[in-house]
Amino acid sequence: PSTPPPPLSPASREALPVRIDGEWFDLRRWRAAHPAGVHWLDGFAGRDATDVMHAFHSEDAVAMLSRLPRLSAAVQPPSLPPASALTLGFRRLRARRRRGEGR
């Protein structure tokens, strides 16, 4: 298994890049308003937060993603590995369960 990149320092970035469901979002404007605190967003800077997003947020919060700014390919962190086959399988199962399909 590869080691994820270290978190980005808030002072050293112009964007707060976080990957959710395969898309990169810039969460810097949402940072101060995040109900659980800035440390959660800062901890996922440059990382994939898909599973945390779906595990700890309501469907309304997940729907809010459509209103958040996406990052262009030019400013996305280049070194984040793709999700593993196991993780992708878990995500497919979670999606089926949300749709009421059971297993």
Image: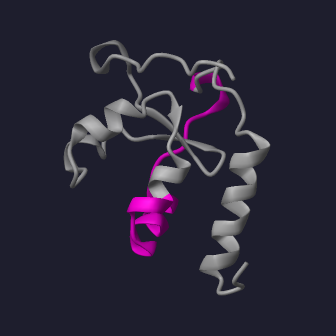
The scheme the figure's colours follow is one colour
Residue 72, position in %: x, y? 61, 33
Left or right: 3 with respect to 46? right
Residue drawn where x is 65% and y is 82% of the image = 99
Left or right: 58 with respect to 91? left
Does the magenta-highlighted stretch encompass residue 7?
A: no
Q: How many marks?
A: 0
The prevailing secondary structure element of the residues shown in magenta is helix
- Say which of 8 and 97 sits in front: 97
Q: Quadrant of the C terminus?
A: bottom right
Vertically, is 64 above or below 24? Answer: below
| Residue 79 position by quadrant | top right
Residue 32, position in %: x, y? 20, 42
Residue drawn where x is 22% and y is 51% of the image = 36
Vertically, is 61 above or below 35? Answer: below
- Say which of 55 and 76 sits in front: 55
Left or right: 33 with respect to 90? left
- Say which of 72 and 36 sits in front: 36
Residue drawn where x is 41% and y is 21% of the image = 7
Residue 89, position in %: x, y? 75, 56
Q: Quadrant of the N terminus?
A: top right
Does the magenta-highlighted stretch encompass residue 74?
A: yes
Judged from this view, the residue extending furthest toward the right is 85
Span colored in magenta: 54-75
